[in-house]
Image: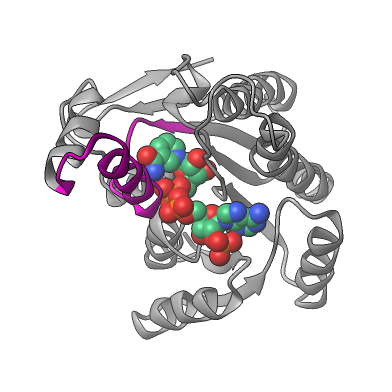
Amino acid sequence: MAQIRSVLVTGASRGIGEAIAKALGRAGWFVFAAARSKERCDEVAREIVKAGGRAEGLALDVGDVTSLTHALDRLKDRELALDGLVNNAGIAISAPLVHPSEDLVEKHLRVNFHGPRRLIEAFLPEMKRQKFGRIVNVASSAGLRGYKYVSAYCASKHALVGYSRAAADELAESGVSIACVCPHYVDSPMTDASVKRLVEKTKRNESDARALLAAQNPGGCLVTVEAVADAVVDLMGEGRNGWIVELDGSASRVIEKR
Ligand SMILES: NC(=O)c1ccc[n+]([C@@H]2O[C@H](COP(=O)([O-])OP(=O)(O)OC[C@H]3O[C@@H](n4cnc5c(N)ncnc54)[C@H](OP(=O)(O)O)[C@@H]3O)[C@@H](O)[C@H]2O)c1
């Protein structure tokens, strides 16, 4: 890459987002590593810089419009053209279909869909003007099919995949690409939380619970955060528009092309 390009990675404080931020740093991008825990994002940014890259931490709650506005203002102050956006921040709360105490569908849509959608809307005008932009949304296999007890999560990820498919059609020939990665269970803190819940509910030990989740992946293994990061870097580098890349825990990627 001849020119330094900058990218915002949301949910970069840990897990998949941290791996994506570091991989993009290694690939030569100036990385804005964003999440609610700014201190952790600063730490991730420092590690990218230590490895020879360029990065800064940024406080951002994608589910909060005021926080989004502040973060976008901070990015404008930096006077760097934003060429890339990785919408990775996300939540997953499991519950039966009707949850008595909280509107989980609204909560998942706010963070997992409206957050990314608002960031895309904020970035697109400048990307279209400069005829260059790379957007990757970290969705999920739950954006391609349904699973029991995560209807709110599935709804939000289906929304993100559907929006991305439509946006890819609209952005064809614009120089801006939009793609999704859809991993099955990933070896990340989000899955650690699922393992913990399984241990509590079923009295299995931790390694059996982890093996049970891995066995649900068609490839039989948990997807690594590095495999997700590699897929994102490839999609960003090549500007794959409308690609939906499913990572199922096997060595291969299942790719839907528009
Ligand atoms: N783990 C899996 O099995 C799996 C499978 C398929 C897809 N995914 C998707 O991959 C993405 C990353 O998952 P992960 O496994 O890395 O999860 P994770 O370990 O729980 O990390 C989630 C990240 O998102 C950030 N985040 C959460 N809510 C946020 C908010 N309102 N605003 C800004 N940042 C927020 C968290 O940082 P703060 O808490 O500091 O804000 C953290 O950096 C998610 O979109 C998830 O749905 C995960």
Q: Residue 169 vs residue 50: left or right?
A: right
Seen in the picture, residue 35 relative to 230 is either above or below; the reply is: below
Q: Percent x, y for residue 69?
A: 85, 61
Please name the colour scheme applied to the rendered image: one colour
Q: Is residue 165 visible?
A: yes
Q: Percent x, y for residue 129?
A: 82, 46
Viewer-closest of 21 and 79:
21
Residue under the point 79% across and 59% down: 68
Residue under the point 52% across and 40% down: 92
Seen in the picture, residue 111 relative to 104 is either above or below; the reply is: below
Q: Percent x, y for residue 39?
A: 55, 81
Viewer-closest of 17 and 24:
17
Q: Residue 105 vs residue 31: left or right?
A: right
Seen in the picture, residue 109 relative to 37 is either above or below; the reply is: above
Q: Percent x, y for residue 63?
A: 73, 50
Seen in the picture, residue 214 relative to 255 is either above or below; the reply is: below
Question: Bounds of the magenta span?
Answer: 181-206
Quadrant in which the C terminus is drawn: top right
Q: Residue 115 vs residue 48: left or right?
A: right
Q: Quadrant of residue 156?
A: top right
Residue under the point 30% across and 38% down: 198
Residue 116 inside the magenta-drawn segment: no
- How many marks on residues? 0
Q: Residue 64 vs residue 38: left or right?
A: right
Residue under the point 25% across and 43% down: 199
Q: Quadrant of residue 56?
A: bottom right
Residue 184 inside the magenta-drawn segment: yes
Q: Is residue 6 visible?
A: no
